[in-house]
Image: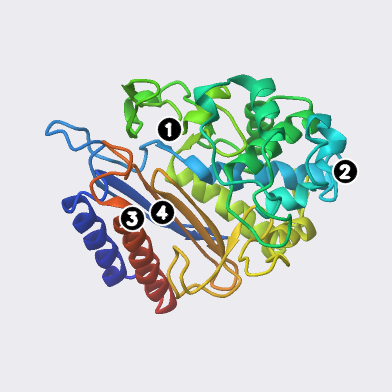
Amino acid sequence: MNAPGLEAVADLLSDAVTARVTPGAVVHAGTSRGPLWTLAAGHLTYAADAELVTPATVYDLASLTKVLATTALAMRHACTGALPLDTIVADRLPQCSAQPRITVADLLEHAAGLPAHRPFYREVAGRAGYLARIAAEPSAYTPRATHAYTDLGFMLLGLLIEDAGGAPLPVQFDQVVRDALGPAEIAYGMRDGWRARVAPTSVSPWRERMLVGEVHDDNAAALGGAAGHAGLFGTAAAVGAFARWFLALWQGRVIVSAGITTAQARRFAARGTVARSSRALGWDTMQPSSSCGPRLSPRAIGHTGYTGTSLWIDPDRDLYVVLLTNRVHPGSGGDGGADGIKALRVAVHDALADAHATGS
């Protein structure tokens, strides 16, 4: 990455910290061949004595869980035949038999008719309670007639994946990490040595405390901290390692890895057929209004997380960009609000795409 490109991103991060969009941030970029660079800015909190953010800072990855864990495991189980994409959800979870006959693919494309969010944590906890409540939820629209981004669908996917793999999500995800990435600081929940360098998120009114090393999403907390829609923590370098792995598989540099084939990776990265939807299987795809800005190629895929995280992967530019923040600190949305993080995401990706195109 050329010096002007680095300087532009450093200035963007510094300005965002000053404007209290986020206390701190880490940006990490690279290609399928390796990392290009990592830049850290700001502090873990706004306190005068807060520790500096470093490349080793651990963040709550929020909805990046949907693609890093749930979608990756869905790919693996689709390849082995343990959970084909055309599986009818009610055939595996009979509690859902009163709902339309939605499939695993429908859930992955956010097109199964489920609403975006429900505060189930106020009334239930654990697998049985959540399954009963989601199964009883009336459809918000006719499945596949349109789409609506939904946590509930990925909660169901998490349950289906646990059954298909015969193990809890953290156990299955750890195996994918070992097979695909090797040593990498990414997992459900906290690991030894992480807590001192984790970025706090915000106060949970339900839990009545500032969340430091606890999953920000209350529904994920009520499910034990590990769910299909949230629960992962990790460093920018670890998310970057996942991006390199997926890029190499997607581009065909590696044909099979972690039980997942190039053909399956390409299938999951392709935009679906739901009307007016930019969704692929798990992933979102490039639009001019996307959080990655307008300069990535049309085949780019990505995802964001509510806590202020994002990952975009561009196979044509051979570029990935990880942006991790705790923009929700200290309140539910941070002082910069949704507009602040949206503008930061677009500006960072624009600067990196331009710098990469002019010679990294």
Spatial separation of the CA atoms under disc 4 and disc 2: 35 Å
Spatial separation of the CA atoms under disc 1 and disc 2: 33 Å
**What secondary structure is marked by label 1?**
loop
Question: Which residue, given by chain and number where applicable, does mark 1 sit on?
Answer: 216
Residue 1 makes an appearance in the image: no
Left or right: 250, with 231 as reference point: right
**What secondary structure is marked by label 2?**
loop
Whether pointer 4 and pointer 2 mark residues with C-beta atoms closer than 8 Å, the reply is no
Identity, as a three-letter code, of the amino acid under mark 1 = His
Earlier in the chain: of badge 3 and badge 4, it is: 4
Circle number at residue 81: 2
Identity, as a three-letter code, of the amino acid under mark 2 = Gly
Give the mark toward the camera: 1 or 2.
Answer: 1
Question: Which residue, given by chain and number where applicable, does mark 3 sit on?
Answer: 341
**What secondary structure is marked by label 4?**
strand
Q: Residue at x 68, y 25 (%)?
A: 168
Question: Which residue, given by chain and number where applicable, does mark 4 sit on?
Answer: 28
